[in-house]
Amino acid sequence: MASAPQPKYLRVIDLGACIGCGACEAVCDFLHDGRPFIKVYRTSLGLDIPLSCFHCSKAPCVEVCPTGAMTRDQSGAVYVEKSKCIGCLACLYACPFSIPELEPVLKVSSKCDLCKPLREMGLTPGCVSMCPAGAILYGEEALVYEAGKKRIAESMAKARFEALR
Amino acid sequence: MDFMNFAFLCRSKPASRNLRVAVIGAGPAGLAATGYLVCRGFEVDVFDKQPLPGGMTVFAIPPWRIPKQRVLEGVKRLEEVFGVRFYTRTKVFAGEVRHEEGDSLVEKSVPLEQVVNDYHAVLISTGTWESKIPRLPGVGSEGVVSALDYLYRVRVFELGFTASPPPRSRRAVVIGGGYSAIDAAEQASRMGADATIVYRRTVREAPAGVYEVERVKREGVDFVELASPVEVVAENGRAKGVRFQRMRLGPPDESGRPQPVPVEGADFVLEADLVIFATGEAPTPPVSRSEDVLRKLGLSLKKDGSVSVNKIYQTSNPKVFAAGDVVTGPSRVGPAVRSGLYAGRFVENWLETQLVKAPLTAR
């Protein structure tokens, strides 16, 4: 079928770097006319947690979708093919993170597609672009794994350095 | 990506529409609007009173929260790739200039009237650069500062814009329960002070949240709840400590939080050589509050000093828009970015309708 396999892209939110400012939600809200697909929740502990689709590799929402509307693009982002969706929300029942939402006008499931239109123009998802804290890692899978590990290595080195006497 | 990509909607500068927009205040709201507008083909000039763009993200918020470089690199890209012109150290103001915090590095002042005349549309996003300090005996003493002023002085020194170091302290008392209080206390603590945060309600009501309070406690900051300052104790004009009134929680107030009520006869003094008030900030629009000036520009302010706007972030002068904390009062980066982006789009829509209706009359 497909000739050369496209590199898979990944978005990982580094909760250790997140300051809970809500810039990601703000951009997403703007790009989706008031219905953001990444939301920052104020928890009872006072810690703000951003939540959005994880684009799981074995996505239960894709598995259960009866019409094949919930699908995956070549970069690995899980998205909804609106014309195929019947709005049954089986995806929501299957999702361990309660991500999909019914779009009120078209009555179809809607969720983060990692800014498909922007990616098609060679740009990065809005939330990634505008995060002031650099808490959203995004890129080719292998690069994101590396970036995450480098951060951990840096903090381990820092901890050892601070313990130096 | 190692920078904030304010122009997240385009890869390069699109064809110019030859319409000039001025953004006053290069904080999160102003920069978000700028990023949107350049991607839509507008020529954007940005004015800011600081020597670098970025607003509070560069000149107040500590680098362990927001790495300055991410913001500054993003600004550089706006300049180099998208041709945005930044006029720094430039304070835009109409009427008699009011002193605000963070004014010390201003070199040039430009009348707001001139900016309004020179551009097809103007966005005001000047934020909240005025701290609200309760009028207590002794607050005029040396060694009493606002959290904003304190953090600003640390940042400006760090960036090398001044040779005068921020106030040093052995014992710092920070009054407040928000993020400014947390940041000021953590800053003082990292600079070698024994820092104590004192809040009039309990940690459960603190706007910064339980998590942040616990986090700085582990960094060595003390947290005292249920106490409200009544006086700064001073000797020879220098702060020596703060007298606090013990409080208890009473019935909820209009904000829905339990109101702190004084406990009769219970007060105590905390020794301090640096007293930091983190008791809120107020909007600082680029106009004086004089009726004449406001009428001439067609602007109006609300009682708290914020700029009043309609649903499309437009002031009563149709070509002047406003967004960010100068409209909403102190918030966070997120809400500022949100209103900046929407305001940018409304500026675009409004300019487009003007093109349809009649020739523009700028310049």
Image (cartoon, coloured by chain):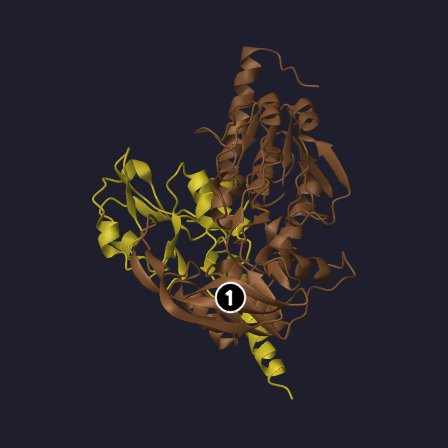
**Whether residue A115 is visible:** no
Mark 1 surroundings: few (<14), some (14-19) or many (≥20) residues within 10 A: some
- In the image, residue B85 lies at what x, y percent? 72, 37
Q: Nearer the viewer, residue B322 or A21?
A: B322
On screen, residue B23 above or below B268? above
Q: Nearer the viewer, residue A23 or A84?
A: A23
- In which chain is the residue bearing label 1? A
On screen, residue B34 above or below B41? below
**Quadrant assignment, res B98:** top right
From the viewer's perspective, is A84 left or right of B346? left
* Amino acid on which the number 1 mark rests in the picture: Tyr
Chain letter matching colour yellow: A
Quadrant location of the N terminus of chain B? bottom right
- In the image, residue A62 lies at what x, y percent? 30, 52
Mark 1 falls on what kind of element?
helix
**Quadrant assignment, res B310:** top left
Quadrant location of the C terminus of chain B? top right
Chain letter matching colour brown: B
From the viewer's perspective, is B273 left or right of A83? right
Q: Nearer the viewer, residue A83 or B289?
A: B289
- In the image, residue A100 lies at what x, y percent? 30, 49
How many numbered marks are there? 1
Image point (49%, 52%), residue name: A6
**Whether residue B158 is visible:** yes
- In the image, residue A24 lies at what x, y percent? 47, 50
From the viewer's perspective, is B230 left or right of B27? left
Residue located beneath label 1 in the image = A145
On screen, residue B19 above or below B74? above
Kindly give the residue lying farthest to the top in the view shown. B358
